[in-house]
Amino acid sequence: MRKIEAIGEQTLNAIAGVGKGAWLVLNGFILFFNNKRNWQTLIHQISFAGIMSLPLIAMSAVFIGMVFTIQSYWVLESFGAASEVGLVLGLSVFRELGPVITALLYTGRVGSSITAELGLMKTSEQFASMELMSVDPISRIVGPRLVAMVITLPLLTMFFNWVALLGSAFVAGKLIGLDSGTFWSNLKNGILFYSDVLPGLFKSFIFGLIIASVSLYHGYFGDPTPSGVAKNSTRTVVQGSMLVLIFDYILVALMR
């Protein structure tokens, strides 16, 4: 009986957590637009979440594109289709690799950082101080970070896609010896915006909303202790990554 009670209690806590997270996200979106000062904070958060993530995204994208090209070439060459390396990479990157890998990297860098930041603010009672000054912390703190994360992840995904293609083109043309004109021609003719590029960007938007919800929830409602901040940052990375993979399957199944 105790095990059943424990399972029931954990289930109820999980449902309550989803409700609290949905309430936080909804209020964050609504209250963000009620204060003009939030736009300045939004620019700062876009710089932190987007621009500061470019080196990590670029380094990962270029090597993933290069490695994938070599692996694809070895397989396709045995079938006499080595010239289709660019098309295979493009389809894989735009549909799957770009959105998923960018979201996982984003969770580790931005999501955990925002959770730790909000946790430290709560530990130092900055939220309570803001409430004493009649400043809503959801509007000033949660809202700009939420909007910034939803905006920057699709943009970073687009950046990842094109850097991966450049890395692939370099390996295909300089190391493997494939004709660069054929590489880009097959890529241009085989990639369709509405069926290949747009679904990946839509997935990135959903992933950004998921990662923002998880990181802000654990930062805002987490235990305001040093050990609690560390554990909540870890939970953000683990839960955010798992939810990205789960929703990736769901979205792929629904969109096909």
Image (cartoon, rainbow, N blue to C red):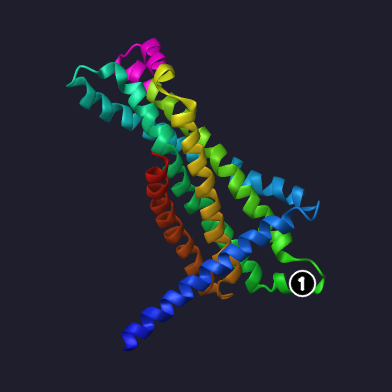
**Residue 54 seen by the camera:** no
Instruction: Please state the horizontal and vertical placement of residue 67, each as a whole percent of the image.
Output: 32, 32
Q: Is residue 174 above or below residue 67?
A: above
**Residue 66 seen by the camera:** yes
Residue 171 painted magenta: yes
Q: Where is residue 53, by image quadrant?
A: top right
Say which of 145 and 249 sits in front: 249
Residue at point 42%, 54% (across, down): 241
| Mark 1 neighbour class, 10 Å CA radius: few under 14, some 14 to 19, many 20 or more | few
Say which of 90 and 225 sits in front: 90
Left or right, 205 with respect to 48, comes to left
Q: How many marks?
A: 1
Left or right, 60 with respect to 110, comes to left
Q: Which residues are magenta?
A: 170-186
Q: Is residue 19 above or below residue 143?
A: below
Q: Which residue is mark 1?
A: 131
Furthest residue toward left: 78
Left or right, 169 with respect to 159, comes to left
Left or right, 64 with respect to 225, comes to left
Say which of 246 and 156 sits in front: 246
Instruction: Please state the horizontal and vertical placement of residue 197, each as a whole percent of the image.
Output: 47, 31
